[in-house]
Amino acid sequence: MRRPLDLRHVISPGLRDLVELANTDDFDRVTEQVRDLRGCTSPVNLHGWTVTTDQTTKQVVRSYRSEDEPSGRLLTTCGNRRASRCPACSRLYAADTYHLIKAGLSGGKNVAEAVRDHPRAFVTLTAPSFGPVHNRPTTNAGKPRPCPCGENHPQDAPELGTPLRPASYDYTGAVLWNAHAGALWARFTTYLRRALAEHLGMTQKALKTALRVSFAKVAEYQQRGLVHFHAVVRFDGPEGHTTSPPPWATFDALRVAVGLAVERARLTVESNAVGDRVIRWGDRFKVDQISALGDGELTDAKVAGYVAKYATKNAEGAGTVDRTLVCRPCAGRGHVRGPDGFRDLCADCDGTGQAEPLTDLPVQQHARQMIRTAWALGYLPEFADLKLWKWAHMLGFRGHFSSKSRAYSTTLGALRDVRRAWRTAQAEAARIRAGLPVDDENTTLVTASSWTYLSSGYRPGEELLAAQVRHDIAHTQRAKQEGLLPADDGLACRIARTRPGTEGEPTRA
């Protein structure tokens, strides 16, 4: 009979838990579960069961219960797209986004390969100025010039993007611009089609009959805390990517239409407290042609890698935090309903509605002031529908980081379905190799399941195993980059090596 280990001398809870797991009969299964998560930092813990039966014979083909696991629960990936929260899941999201964007440029994934011959542009839209900020200006020849403050800031200077005169900086306008950036993009896409019809001298109905405008865009935070958009815009025929656009639908026409749409797209925000505001695009925008031959400055792979990289970024690039600041017990209201029916002060936030005091946030003063402004504006009646207090940690931005038109290319859901089908095929192949029965193609299977969310995260010992998995993955990637191991398709490397601020130009890390 095995004597229980005396682990009282082991100080680390993680090491103590790992030793206990290692001395169980099912340690291999624990290791397998953690390894299958591919380094996920905060897996979802589920409890439940699933049963697959043959509809004709009512025979159980396969079944699974989380109670049969050593820990009594099933671990599955969190699926978070943000690299600051889960690098492992964000890499998968970036890979899917890469294939989604590239399919709309080069074809594949049920998209016709002829799209590479369609007029395509990489469009960058920026926010207007709300006050002068510290920056690194250059001359027309690309030579650096001093900042308006008189200094030549290095590239990693912490003051970059912060106001030169914080007292006169329009923080209210900046937060409201972020809050309406998604709606302004929707307005831009409408005005783009109208401007294109005007430039070509035809009605909007005639344009819609002969041409379809498809796009995919991603939002990126600038250092000053404002979002700007990178978009791939493509001309298609009336039936979508399967048909060629008419000869008069050229890149030059697209460039002119973008300029007109940027100038005309406007949103008016009315407020008695802060005055009426006009939400518009900044004067600086770019329209670059995407090379069809793969030998230009902007190729399909470069653009797709650039967009995929920023699809996993969040507001942390602007110096803010990547977590909500709303107190959960009171949902940001500052009070809870007591047993007597009256409002009681929330004990968790002392009535502030904040999960943590804004003054204690580890952020620079510029980001803190934008958070404060968003929090204050969120409680004004005219901005109640924006729920800015909920998005204060995002500096007011509440739109989707990435979106696309329906006909641009495939969808993330379709890519996940393909990956799920591939894994199912791999599992069937493993059953065949093991001599186990496999499903008949003519058999109709019915699956029933019931799952309950338990928590998120690892046990202390499992966290050590996950850290080892992450180390092994990083070591393998470095070995591939250095040529010590055979390289794969290079997707992860292209995304990881795309520098911020460039048009997708790859560089060595």
Image (spheres, rainbow, N blue to C red):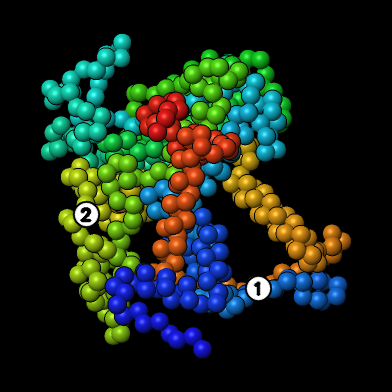
Tag 1, which secondary structure? strand
Q: Is residue 312 above or below residue 505?
A: below
Determine the residue positioned at 55% across, 77% down. Answer: 25
Sequence order check, earlier mark of 2 and 1: 1
* Residue 77 vs residue 218, the one in the foreground: 77
* Residue 405 vs residue 190, the one in the foreground: 405
Determine the residue positioned at 14% across, 37% down. Answer: 166
Q: Which residue is mark 1?
A: 64
Determine the residue positioned at 42% across, 22% down. Answer: 286
Spot occupied by residue 154 in the image (x, y as percentages of width and height)? 22, 28
Q: Which residue is mark 2?
A: 361
Q: Amino acid at mark 2?
A: Leu
Estimate how packed mark 1 is, as few (under 14), some (14 to 19) or many (20 or more) residues with alpha carbons within 10 Å: few
Q: CA distance from mark 2 to mark 1?
A: 45 Å
Q: Is residue 309 above or below residue 3?
A: above
* Residue 9 found in image quarter: bottom left
Determine the residue positioned at 34% across, 28% down. Answer: 282
Q: Residue furthest top?
A: 141
Using the rendered image of the protein, determine whether residue 386 is visible from the camera's viewpoint: yes
Tag 2, which secondary structure? loop
